[in-house]
Image: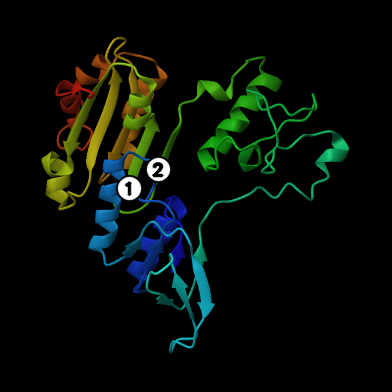
Amino acid sequence: MIVGGSYIALEFAQMYRRFGAQVTVVERGPRLASREDEDVSASIREILEAEGIDVVVNADDVRLAKRDNGFGGFELTPSVGAPAIAGSHLLLAVGRRPNTDDLGLEAAGVQTDARGYVVVDDQLKTTVDHIWALGDCNGKGAFTHTSFNDYEIVAANLLDGDPRRVSDRILTYALYIDPPLGRAGMTVAQVRASGRKALVGKRPMTKVGRAVEKGETQGFMKIVVDADTHEILGAAILGVGGDEVIHAILDVMSARAPYTTLSRTMHIHPTVSELVPTMLQEMEPLD
């Protein structure tokens, strides 16, 4: 039984299912991976359910009780009036807090926020001029790649006189289920909420030759572009190789080059990446 429906929860759910366990994911909200667009969330759920993982959403009143159910476990009731679900092992994947409360930061004058993250500026300097905070403790991204980039930013400022900033980097990450989700920049929902004119391209993996050849056609690719500036605003690649393909888009975003830089580039056949230019050539206005 896994309580939580975000990245760690879903990765562990698929892992344990493939080990042979019966797995139920219990999520408080109306859908899995709620940070993503609804079509991405729906596809993720389809992928997991196809492997036999049970998904329970809208679990707004989770209650646990020990029960002698034959395997020394418990029962979980997801909401009022819902039937109880039997389980033997429980994983809570409902968020993390940094372990900063016992570091004595207050004695050094280093401030933390309400959740315990060390307060830093755009160059990762704390409220004490000679102390910098890198990695998960600063709340700027709980990933290995963001932590390493933190180091690069601090080293550039301290040693090279190069004023690199956290705000210069583009949000990017992956969800490591199989197939993986590679993400960069804004979601379509975020772009729509911003009110800007945009173009959206989308291509199912069933129309990607490499995916068909490998027999791995779950998921899709999606990209959103500013209609006026032609800047790529965000992308989601849910499918085989998605965690690698996303970098072709991320690099163009980082260079702040127009999407035509990518759409007019010849890619190698047969790859997943070769269909990214095609997707960009077939975009339509965002509703």
Crowdedness near tag 1: few (<14), some (14–19) or many (≥20) residues, C-alpha within 10 Å: many
Q: Which residue is mark 2?
A: 174
Does 131 sit above or below residue 253? below
Return the residue nearer the eye: 260 or 203: 203
* Residue on which the image places disc 1: 180
Residue 258: x %, y % from top left: 30, 13
Asked if 36 appears above or below 187 in the picture, the reply is below
**Residue in view at x 52 percent, y 20 percent:** 168
What residue do we see at 25% from left, 48% from top? 43
Q: Quadrant of the C terminus?
A: top left
Residue reaching furthest to the front:
81
Mark 1–mark 2 Cα distance, whole angstroms, equals: 7 Å
Q: Position of residue 274 (x, y in %)?
A: 19, 31
Proximity of marks 1 and 2: CB atoms separated by less than 8 Å: yes
* Left or right of 215, for residue 233: right
In this view, the residue farthest toward the top is: 228
**Crowd band around label 2 with a 10 angstrom C-alpha radius: few (<14), some (14–19), many (20+):** some
Q: Secondary structure at mark 1?
A: loop
- Is disc 2 placed on a helix, strand or loop? strand
Q: Amino acid at mark 1?
A: Pro
Q: Position of residue 38 (x, y in %)?
A: 30, 42
In the displayed structure, 75 sits above or below 283; it is: below
Side of 120 relative to 59 (left or right)? right
Left or right: 236, with 122 as reference point: left
Residue flagged by tag 2: what amino acid is it?
Ala
Q: How many marks?
A: 2
Rendering quarter of residue 205: top left
Please report whichever mark, 1 or 2, sits nearer to the chain's N-terminal start.
2
Q: Quadrant of the N terminus?
A: bottom left
Residue 71, position as x, y percentages in the image: 45, 86
Q: Residue at x 25, y 45 (%)?
A: 239
